[in-house]
Image: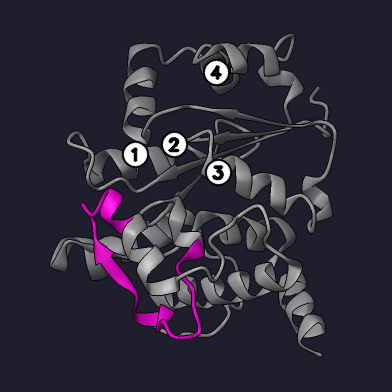
């Protein structure tokens, strides 16, 4: 029987993602529990795929624990059975030489349940998408080259300036704005309507829409962060919509 209080977050990197997570806990109580644990994978999602291919018998907790010493310490004496939910955060990483849409599709389909193998959330094109919102930026139409790599970080800095560059200092107002913008963008990507979604939109629906509308025809992605989408999923569309309305009043 699983301990319903333990939730594991797995981040691709150990810097930006952790900053976001630590700040997010200040304002969203469901993430502010002593039994929440975060670990890092320290490389792109395709490496996770190859690791799984080599040893498919390993569960996700065991696999993550073996990545580095910090993970071994964080997950000491913790088994998969003691973890209620697992969330993984990775970048689309179109610039990675081994990147393929077929592999990513397999990964999203495999990691589709937080209480089983784990739930995968993808940022398009990378974690810095969280900051790519600004009063002077048409976020609805913000798309970028899929192989932009480090130049995307530069682009975000140029277009958004110091708007929300310091992820350790995000306020609740910042988060509400970010969640609303990314929620609308999610709905626009999947349903062609730039309004906050009326119901849950899955990661596989999002990826298929990105493939059909952006990746395949023009080799671009519509900018979208995984973190606000997690919050929408975790709390539920209706509750988040209510919170946004209350904040606006």
Q: Residue 175: x percent and y percent?
A: 67, 67
The reply to whether callout 1 and callout 3 are in contact (CB within 8 Å) is no
- Side of 62 where 111 appears, left or right: left
Comes first in the chain, label 4 or label 1 = 4
| Residue bearing the label numbered 3 | 17
Q: Quadrant of the N terminus?
A: top right
Comes first in the chain, label 3 or label 2 = 3
The reply to whether callout 2 and callout 1 are in contact (CB within 8 Å) is yes
| Residue bearing the label numbered 1 | 106
Is 184 inside the magenta-drawn segment?
A: no
Q: CA distance from mark 4 to mark 1?
A: 17 Å
Q: Residue 63: x percent and y percent?
A: 51, 16
Q: Relative to the observer, which residue lies in front, 150 or 34?
A: 150
Tag in front: 1 or 3:
3
The residue segment tinted magenta is 131-152
Residue 158 to residue 149: above or below: below
Element type at mark 3: helix
Residue 154 to residue 110: above or below: below
| Residue bearing the label numbered 2 | 110
Q: Residue 139: x percent and y percent?
A: 42, 78
Q: Quadrant of the C terminus?
A: bottom right
Query: What numbered label is drawn on residue 59?
Result: 4
- Side of 59 where 82 appears, left or right: right
- Farthest residue to the front: give it: 162
């Amino acid at each position: 029987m699983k301990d319903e209080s333990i939730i594991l977050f797995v981040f691709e990197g150990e810097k930006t993602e952790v900053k976001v997570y630590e700040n997010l806990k200040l304002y969203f109580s469901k993430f502010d529990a002593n039994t929440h644990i975060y670990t890092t994978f320290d490389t792109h999602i395709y490496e996770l795929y190859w690791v799984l291919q080599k040893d498919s018998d390993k569960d996700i907790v065991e696999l993550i624990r073996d990545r580095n010493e910090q993970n071994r310490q964080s997950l000491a004496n913790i088994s998969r059975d003691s973890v209620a939910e697992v969330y993984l955060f990775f970048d689309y990483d179109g610039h990675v030489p081994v990147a393929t849409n077929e592999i990513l599709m397999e990964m999203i389909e495999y990691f589709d349940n937080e209480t089983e193998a784990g739930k995968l959330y993808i940022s398009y094109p990378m974690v810095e998408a969280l900051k790519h919102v600004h009063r002077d930026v048409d976020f609805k139409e913000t798309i970028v080259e899929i192989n932009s790599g480090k130049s995307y970080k530069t682009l975000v800095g140029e277009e958004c300036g110091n708007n929300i560059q310091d992820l350790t200092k995000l306020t609740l107002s910042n988060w509400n704005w970010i969640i609303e913008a990314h929620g609308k963008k999610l709905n626009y990507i999947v349903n062609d309507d730039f309004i906050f979604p009326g119901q849950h939109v899955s990661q596989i629906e999002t990826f298929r829409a990105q493939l059909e509308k952006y990746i395949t025809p023009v080799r671009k992605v519509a900018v979208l962060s995984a973190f606000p989408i997690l919050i929408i999923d975790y709390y539920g569309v209706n509750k988040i919509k209510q919170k946004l309305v209350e904040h606006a009043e």
